Image (spheres, rainbow, N blue to C red):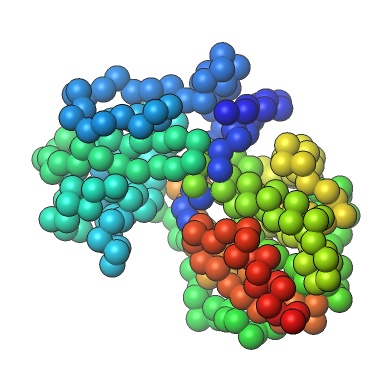
Amino acid sequence: MQIKLSGDFFWTDFSSDFNCCVRSTTFIKVAAAGCAVLALTACGRSTQPLAENARHYETHGIVRGLAPDGRTIDVEHEDIHGFMPSMTMPLSARNPQEIGNMKVGDAIAFRLNVTDQEVWIDNVKKISASEVHLPASTPSPPVSPQSSARLREGDQMPSFSLTNQNGERISLDTFRGEPFVLTFVFTRCPLPNFCPRMSNNFEELQTAIKDGSGALAETRLLSVTLDPDYDSPKVLSDYAAFHHADRKIWSFATGDEKEIDSLTRAFSVYRQTEGGTISHGLTTALIDKDGKIDKIWRGNAWTPREVAEAIRAENE
């Protein structure tokens, strides 16, 4: 696992639909020592096999939602010392039977497992609500509360005006005449299968573009930050360098809050500040050379090969 420090923030070479991250001096000290996170003292010895190189956190939370797949529950969890603050996020179980009898509102104890590629929960059990210690609620409205104008495949990409990692203004016209792939990330993200996976996928896609021909060779990449208050052009420039971004192919962009909110709302990307960090969804889209949205991938399951094939198919 590679770790890069710059100023008072860091990136890990993690390879993720919800995400969170927070500036942490503890994190930095641990990273400087060669570790990515601090482990919590275990609440009990596990009966489950441990994945090699996984980091494990024993914590509590409240079930806030159930996914149709039966493998994922939305959990509002406690602060996880040395890793992430309290927030609500979807968590998957490798053994669906562990969460099969859960109901919204149940208080649970569980272990969060994190590797360089994935996150999952196990050792799930129901507990008394009095054992869950969540921070005092300070509700704030979501940054992106509207969903009625959700873009769909075949729609025209809306206009935008942003600033790239070089401090240059970019807009939809910047990409006119070339296909481009758009995704949303932010630089301070510890969970491997959320934003870091999007950036790693784009890095792999960039290689395919360099080695490709035809429409694939003409395709450009655009990563838009969900954290414009922190992700300045300089921060994005350092992040771009970490991911070996070729400025002729891959742009990282920031903008004012209203401009970012306009784009996230258009693509129905949930984005809300929670516990001092950002909870959000993931959406990636392929826009053709005429500005039409050809394909939309929601979540983190898409692969660079899948996107490359979609680009080739659109131009056959």
Q: Residue at x 34, y 49 (%)?
A: 91
x, y percentage for residue 62? Answer: 24, 48
Q: Residue furthest top?
A: 33
Which residue sits at x=46%, y=53%?
A: 18
Horizontal side of 130 relative to 55 (left or right) equals: left
Residue 165 vs 37, above or below: the answer is below
Q: Quadrant of the C terminus?
A: bottom right
As drawn, 49 above or below 140? above
Picture layout, residue 90 above or below residue 309: above
> Picture quarter containing residue 77?
top left
Indicate the position of residue 33 as horizontal and vertical percent values. 56, 14
User: Residue 176 vs residue 139: left or right?
Assistant: right
| Left-right relation of 236 to 126 | right
Could you tell me residue 201's position as x and y percent?
63, 52
> Could you tell me if residue 82 is visible in this image?
no
Residue 297 locus on image (x, y percent):
55, 68
Query: Which residue lies at the image location 62% right of the left edge and 28% below the top edge?
Result: 2
Question: Where's the N terminus, which quadrant?
Answer: top right
